[in-house]
Image: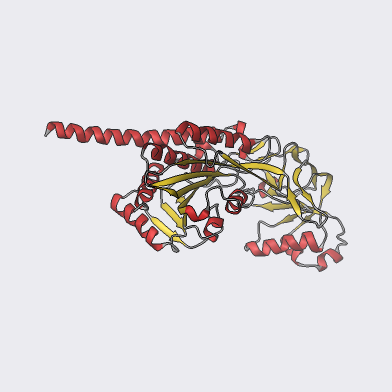
Amino acid sequence: MRYLLLIILYLFLFVSFSRAQDTLYARKVLNELCSPKYKGRGYVGNGDKKAAAYIQNQFKTIGLKKVKGTYTQSFTFPVNTFPKKVEVKYNGVLLVAGRDYIINAGCKTFHFNGTLPFSSSENLQDSSFYDRVGYQQTMAVIDTFSQNKGSEAFLTNKKYLSDFKKSLLVKLTNDKLTWTSSYQEDDNCIITLKNNVYDRSRLAHFEIAIESKFYGEYTAKKELIGTYTSKNVLGMLEGTENKDSFIVFTAHYDHLGMMGSTALFPGANDNASGIAMLLNLAKYFKEHPQKYSLLFIAFSGEETGLIGSQYYVSHPIIPLEKMHFLINIDLMGNGAEGVMTVNGANYKEQYNLLSNLNIKNNYLPAVKARGKAKNSDHYYFSEAGVPCFFFYLMGSYPFYHDINDKASAVPFTNFDNAFLLFRDFIIGLQP
């Protein structure tokens, strides 16, 4: 009996240690990909290329094989970047990019030095206001934070920029500053400024210096051709029985990069955490071969419009018809409230397997399902007929597409249990 208890204790400690090691490895990956040398894994300073090289090296170290003789798949696309100066001074004070303001991701190179009039959102709704005050300037500060409905605020901005031909718009907001990426250039410069920075009691003087670099060219037929080259990273493990049928794991590694030389968007939860989960799964299945072959793909271009995954679907290295099931992984930072399964409502048999595994093992507080959504790299595979789920963990995490989505902010709550659920689900998919 004593011998049996020692064996049970040993197995318990071994499993606990292994799970701790998984989380330690995930934390190491997270810290690495969010470090300044990767420049937010965007398209400034080769941040995406450095991240791709790191992931490729991890694939090699783990023991993943090349896919049809290669670890990478290159593609080109248009994207607007800000590799140098992005500076905004307000009444002589240099504002902090990402904290005090953001610029529209499609902004062209733009310079301005002068005063800007202020308009309330109510005035913007009244077209006679412009005639009444002789409003002919092409630039202004407007109050949008008092707009209760996003659609109204959008229409207001559109009307202001288009109908009244404004070239510079400074929008005041009380909301969190959330940036994005753009595959095109805009005709206008839009600066979203935190409301607490702006002083309504005095005239606003702005000094604006924005330098952009656009990777795109227009053909004679005015078709946009992208000139930035990035790459997807691939690796595979051969199955023991159904070698020609694949279970696919995907996660995007790109993020927003930098807005100028100082504003870094680390992208810890989105999606260094997903890459950490993908690499952990690769490590496990390397040591535990499966009946089906396993394909791992780290995509670039997701933040600019699912470009890397769309390119793969159009130029598959492993044919889509050989994909038995695909699992896309994003936002793995906090699973305190469980996991959401996009496409769970569409593939009920697989969803029931997932849900029953969770109930049996009590891994996560909830396994929820929703229908189709064009919100991550699974989408084009799904549209092409590949059965797939998109998993993202649910839990309070306030940082998204901002400068505060740092490695130190990610709690990795239930990360290890989510790993176990995904592991069991994959094993269960193989009859």
What coloring was used for the rendering?
Answer: secondary structure
Query: Residue drawn at (79%, 52%), measured in percent from left and top?
Result: 218
Whether residue 395 is visible to the viewer of this picture, yes or no, is no
Q: Is residue 175 above or below residue 90?
A: below
> What x and y, as percent, mark residue 374?
56, 58
Which quadrant of the figure contains the N terminus? top left
Q: Position of residue 62 (x, y in %)?
A: 45, 33
Seen from the viewer's position, the closer of residues 14 and 68 is 68
| 284 relative position to 176: left or right | left
The answer to which quarter of the image holds residue 56 is top right
Q: Is residue 154 above or below residue 233?
A: below
Q: Which residue is drawn at 61% across and 42% down?
A: 231
Q: Residue 395, position in %: x, y?
A: 45, 49
Expressed as whole percent of the image width and height from the top left, the position of residue 109 reads 80, 44
Q: How many marks?
A: 0
Instruction: Using the image as rendered, state which of residue 32 and residue 203 is in the foreground.
Output: 32
Query: Residue at image x 67%, y 50%?
Result: 195
Which of 201/128 is in front? Answer: 128
**Can residue 263 be seen here?**
yes
